[in-house]
Image: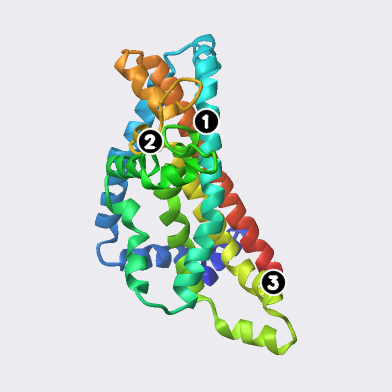
């Protein structure tokens, strides 16, 4: 297919389309030979339009009702800025912690055999399976000042329940699978012969990990960490149970949006929503840029 496309483009540049137009028609006929290509493409576009594009477009269009001064007044309100600071800071902290912990857990699950390995592997997906409200209630019970973990942490002067630390704990629990499940298949498909070749050339284990293994799994690590950060920014259900939800102290942006909706401040809620949406797009762009850059860097080596 690539050779045919090159031949077609070269024909356009040279002006000799007569013998080259068949490449384009052959490409179209090749696509048409796939069973159900038109039907599945139509269903995919319809599904994405109804569930993703239309709701997001409605949010963008509704936010245009706000004048620039009104939009700035909502975003730069001290309470809003405090909520953004708490949301972004907690999400970044949880994502970085999971980047390290997720890499270690994925490494252990792939490289070692031990009792209850399958059970532990299945438990990684629990945050996906249980409702976030259930997770929040469970974490609040365990890490509250009267909880089992809360009493232990209180001995060291750490208040995990109903504080900013509780927000980070909830986000770590919710976003851990994103990092583990992104790195794990890459480690499983990694060619162990590369490690053996590096060892035969005199490399120690630290050099093997940093120069052979890490470059292969680093794009997956970046992707999983970015996905965990983006997911943590929008988390709501688990945080409201383990956080005090006090303005300027532990109030997150999704909770502030809910409060504005309950007060019928739809314009303010849409302004916050469009800001979070723009942040999500920026995160996707940065993630894709880093992936492409790392892929090109590896191809040049």
SS of the residue at dot 3? Answer: helix
State the residue position of label 1: 86
Please tell me in which quadrant of the rendered image residue 277 appears: top left
Q: Is residue 41 above or below residue 240?
A: below
Lower sequence index among marks 3 and 2: 3
Distance of label 3 from label 1 (alpha carbons): 36 Å
The label shown at residue 211 is 3
- Callout 2: 10 Å neighbours few (<14), some, many (20+)? many
Judge from the rendering whether residue 213 lies leftward or rightward of residue 90; answer left or right: right
Percent x, y for residue 12? 58, 58
Q: Residue at x 71, y 74 (%)?
A: 207
Judge from the rendering whether residue 267 lies leftward or rightward of residue 158; answer left or right: left
Q: Are marks 2 and 1 in contact (CB under 8 Å)?
A: no
Name the front one of labels 3 and 2: 2
Percent x, y for residue 88? 53, 35
Distance of label 2 from label 1 (alpha carbons): 14 Å
Lower sequence index among marks 3 and 1: 1
The label shown at residue 242 is 2
Q: Is residue 51 above or below residue 257?
A: below
Q: 133 or 283, which is in the foreground?
A: 133
- Callout 3: 10 Å neighbours few (<14), some, many (20+)? some
Res 102 seen here: yes
SS of the residue at dot 2? Answer: helix
Q: Residue at x 39, y 20 (%)?
A: 269
């Amino acid at each position: 297919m690539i050779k045919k496309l090159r031949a077609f483009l070269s024909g356009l540049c040279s002006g000799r389309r007569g013998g080259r137009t068949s490449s384009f028609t052959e490409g179209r006929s090749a696509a048409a030979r796939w069973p159900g290509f038109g039907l599945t493409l139509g269903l995919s576009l319809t599904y994405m339009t109804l569930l993703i594009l239309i709701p997001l477009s409605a949010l963008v269009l509704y936010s245009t009702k706000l004048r620039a001064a009104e939009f700035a007044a909502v975003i730069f309100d001290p309470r809003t800025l405090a909520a953004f600071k708490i949301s972004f800071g907690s999400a970044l902290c949880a994502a970085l912690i999971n980047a390290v912990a997720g890499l270690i857990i994925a490494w252990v699950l792939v490289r070692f055999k031990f009792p209850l390995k399958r059970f532990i592997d299945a438990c990684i997906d629990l945050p996906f399976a249980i409702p976030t409200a259930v997770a929040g209630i469970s974490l609040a019970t365990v890490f509250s000042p009267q909880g089992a973990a809360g009493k232990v942490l209180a001995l060291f002067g750490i208040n995990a329940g109903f504080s900013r630390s509780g927000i980070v704990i909830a986000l770590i629990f919710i976003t851990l699978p994103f990092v583990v499940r992104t790195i794990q298949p890459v480690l499983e498909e990694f060619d162990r012969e590369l490690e053996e070749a590096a060892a035969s050339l005199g490399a120690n284990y630290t050099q093997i990990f940093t120069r052979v293994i890490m470059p292969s799994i680093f794009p997956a690590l970046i992707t999983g960490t970015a996905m965990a950060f983006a997911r943590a920014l929008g988390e709501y259900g688990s945080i409201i149970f383990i956080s005090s939800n006090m303005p300027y102290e532990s109030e997150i942006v999704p909770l502030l949006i809910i409060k504005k909706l309950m007060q019928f401040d739809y314009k303010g809620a849409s302004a916050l929503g469009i800001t979070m949406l723009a942040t999500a797009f920026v995160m996707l762009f940065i993630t894709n840029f880093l992936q492409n850059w790392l892929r090109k860097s590896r191809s040049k080596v």
